[in-house]
Amino acid sequence: MSGRLRYILFATFALSGVLLYLLATASANTGGFTRHYALLLKLNAAIAVVMLLVIAYLLASLWRRYRAKQFGTQLMARLTLMFALMAIIPGTLVYTVSVQFLSRSIESWFNVRVDASLESGLTLARTTLDAMLQDVAGRSRLMAQELTNVPDASIGALLGRMIDQTGLQEAAVFTTSGRLIATGGTASVRFALDMPSAQILADAARGRGYAGVENVAQSADKPALRMRVVAPITLRLLGAEPRVLQVLQNVPEQLTASAESVQAGYRDYQELSLSRKNLREIYAVTLTLTLLLALFGAIATAFYLSNRLSAPLSLLAQGTEAVAQGDFTPRAEIAGRDELGMLTQSFNRMTRQLDEARASVRQREAQLESAKGYLESILANLTAGVMVFDPDMRLATANQGAETILAFDASQAQWKPLSELPGLADFAARVTDAFKQQGDRVWQQQIELTRRGPREADERSLTLLVRGSRLEVAGGQGYIVVCDDISELVSAQRSAAWGEVAQRLAHEIKNPLTPIQLSAERLQMKLAEKLAGPDAEILARGTGMIVSQVTAMKNMVDDFREYARTPPAALASLDLNALVREVLGLYETAATPVALHLDPALPAIQGDSAQLRQVIHNLLQNAQDAVAGGARTDIELETARAPGGARLTVADSGPGFSQKIIARAFEPYVTTKARGTGLGLAIVKRIVDDHHGTIEIGNREGGGARVSILLRAAA
């Protein structure tokens, strides 16, 4: 309920109370009823219509709220109905009893006894006054007879004596023309000269007297009656003007008051008797208006109180719904010290505490998320693979390192057994056996894993260092497995070992080669002239074989020394395309031409031109050896821009690499050539590692080998 509507209701209630009081007062006052009752009745009816319109507006508003399904509407309707019934039932009962009581009371006022009593009292008063008037009239006539033919000069003295004798109060003698002849009266009562009317004097001149009672009250609060008697005086003198005797006598005050009271009561009774039907209607209308105003006021009060009661509950309901949706904004409080006000204030305190608690939880969640993100960032940047399994060895989570090393998608493999992941059945069996054998202890194993390459025909052998331990998780005891790809480390260890072996072999082999070669040459020199025929030929062939094999062994020892003693790379900014063109200038007359594809937007790289020249020579020599004698003799050299640097690729149309060679291609003495040492790719691998680059080997689609080197861009 709006504030304006409340003010209208309060003003209407106050005005209706004042008008009802005035209406009740006018109903009890005949004069007021006559003058103002119609106006008051109309004003009260107008107030009733205004309140009826207000009630209709409130009911329509309640119906709109009910159709809109607003909270508190049913409670408001019930409270309004209860308040209305509390006003209607007692009000109707009081109204019915009051109407019946007034009807019977009004009828009881107008019975025969009251009417007869009032009429008898009025008759008694009139009889008494008539008797007194006749007595005064008789004595006045006697006095008039004694004043017959009395001279004017003697009338005054005679009047005085007669007043004393008769006990009258005042007497005066007038001519019929109104001239005063003489007057007389008691000392206690002296009336002002009161002439009879002209009509009375005219009647007296014709010989008729007058007797009557007059009202001489100065105010309505003090009634006073006076008897006037006019009697003609008989004259026997010829030519004399007719005379009259006037006697004035006051009616006793007690008798006057009693007569006036009886007469007023009788008059009021007669008026009420004539308007008793209208009186019943008046009281019925007054009571009806009172009942209607009371009912309307009760209903309006019911709306007001129900609104006051339901408003806090509605606020609480809205707040509860908002809290359920996660909104802890404080609601409007009901100002007051009652239970409802305290309830809304307590609810706001609760929402504030919940908001603070939620903020604290969010802060902690943010801290946990930050810590989790930090940990995930660390795990994501670890080169080692980290995997967590549940008690049934189903994958719970894995980092990027594990996906890279084991070549699987963690999002698709989540909550799948490790043994069901493609290509990891043997790895899963080794890990499961390790957990069974070691129990709760931390274990570590080196596991060989064959992983499929980018092409279907390629496979790569990995050496993994795997560590495992048990882990407490929500579902019980889980497992954590950490694996590192140590293939490069193992290859480096092998390369270092081969370098040490090569260095020692070169030292041990080269020392006896020179004496052997010198001895063979000396034998040829000393014995060539002494022998003839077949013996000389055998000597020449034997010494030539010794010298050629010693030369071959010297070349092999030089390869060993080159592999073992590769100098550190002197890195500088280098144009790879220019270096490739320079090297290919030496292969212009080669049996197998090289198809060149250079990227013009290639960035400068960090490299040692001498060592990279050796790398290109070795790769091109291997490609020419691979295509020699084949049906196709295609060799391609390509440079291309790559993330972080440049890529150099050499491909041929030869037989390609076998799976056995791919697994150990960069180890020394691994070769498919009949006369090769197997140090070419090993040297290339070492030079690329010194340049902080990467090298990959594989087979081309449709046949042939492919070697790709990624070199870092210059700063």
Image (cartoon, helix red, strand yellow):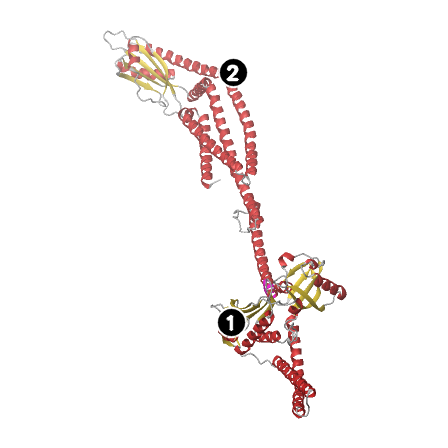
Residue 307 marker: none
Residue 645: in sight, yes or no?
no
Mark 1 or mark 2, earlier in chain: 2
Say which residue appears at 51% left-offset and 31% top-offset. Answer: 295
Q: Quadrant of residue 232?
A: top left
Foreground pick, 451 / 533: 533
Foreground pick, 276 / 524: 524
Asked whether, in this view, residue 119 is left or right of residue 706, the answer is: left
Residue 113 marker: 2
Cα gap from disc 1 to disc 2, whole angstroms:
137 Å
Mark 1 neighbour class, 10 Å CA radius: few under 14, some 14 to 19, many 20 or more = some
Say which residue appears at 60% left-offset and 72% top-offset. Answer: 625
Asked whether, in this view, residue 450 is left or right of residue 169, the answer is: right
Foreground pick, 444 / 379: 444
Mark 2 neighbour class, 10 Å CA radius: few under 14, some 14 to 19, many 20 or more = few
Q: Kindly identify which residue carries mark 1.
A: 713
Residue 672 is a magenta residue: no
Tell me which secondary structure the magenta stretch mostly adopts: helix
What is the magenta range? 373-378
Asked whether, in this view, residue 23 is left or right of residue 661, the answer is: left
Q: Quadrant of residue 706?
A: bottom right
**Amino acid residing under circle 2:** Arg
The answer to the question of whether label 1 and label 2 lie on touching residues, with beta carbons closer than 8 A, is no
Spot occupied by residue 37 in the image (x, y as percentages of width and height): 42, 26
Q: Which residue of the protein is positioned furthest toward the front in this rendering?
A: 533
**Amino acid residing under circle 1:** Ala
Say which residue appears at 45% left-offset and 26% top-offset. Answer: 27
Q: Secondary structure at mark 2?
A: helix
Above or below, comparing residue 84 to residue 498 in the picture: above
Q: Secondary structure at mark 1?
A: loop
